[in-house]
Amino acid sequence: MNRLDRYDLNILSELQRDARISNQDLAERIGLSPSPCSRRVKQLEDDGFILRQVALLDRKKLGLSLTAYVMVGMDRHTPERFEGFETAIRQCPEVLECSLVTGMDADYQLKVVVADMDHYQKFLLGQLTRIEGVTSVRSSFVLNQVLSSTELPLNHLRN
């Protein structure tokens, strides 16, 4: 890992909060002039610290009111079976996150966002349970989202 100094960490913190900030405003906030600030942002992108910039949408305004965490069990624990599942799940736009997990009675944990329970049932029965190797599915539904953040903690990198 490249060594990040306080300017780099401050740039990353500010961009996590608001990636639309102008270079001028970013430079002022972190205490650099605009040219060096711009070069540092470019270097952070080139070094892979900044993967991409996205717009965060309001799911409820878009009619996506149901969030489910889904635990999926597989019949076999082989690289081929996992690869097949992962390829299939990448084709499901309802799935925002998919993680191979350990320490549970499941192999994968999914975060699924849909309009309502009818749409969830269609996803579950029409897509998820039809993926080869899926043997069990357990769903938990979000009642209230207490915290949601896309900002990664950077405190461990500060001296």
Image: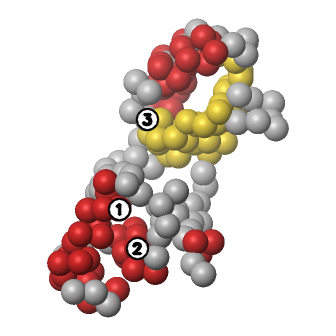
The span from disc 1 to disc 3 (Cα, nearest Å) is 31 Å
Where is mark 3, residue-wise?
Answer: 94
Q: Can you give x and y, in whole percent of width and height, for residue 109 in the image?
A: 64, 36
When asked about the image quadrant of residue 159, the answer is: bottom right
Q: Which residue is mark 2?
A: 8
Query: Is the residue marked by circle 1 packed among few (<14), some (14-19), or many (20+) residues within 10 Å?
Result: some
- Closest to the observer, 46 or 62: 46
Q: Is residue 50 above or below residue 111?
A: below
Q: Earlier in the sequence, mark 1 or mark 3?
A: 1
Are the two marked residues, 1 and 2, in contact with CB atoms closer than 8 angstroms? yes
Q: Secondary structure at mark 3?
A: loop
Q: Which residue in the structure is indicated by mark 1?
A: 44
Measuring 23% from the left and 69% from the top, which residue is drawn there? Answer: 39
Q: Position of residue 87 (x, y in %)?
A: 47, 20
Given residues 47 and 10, the one toward you in this image is: 47
Badge 2 local density, few (<14 within 10 Å), some, or many (20+)? some
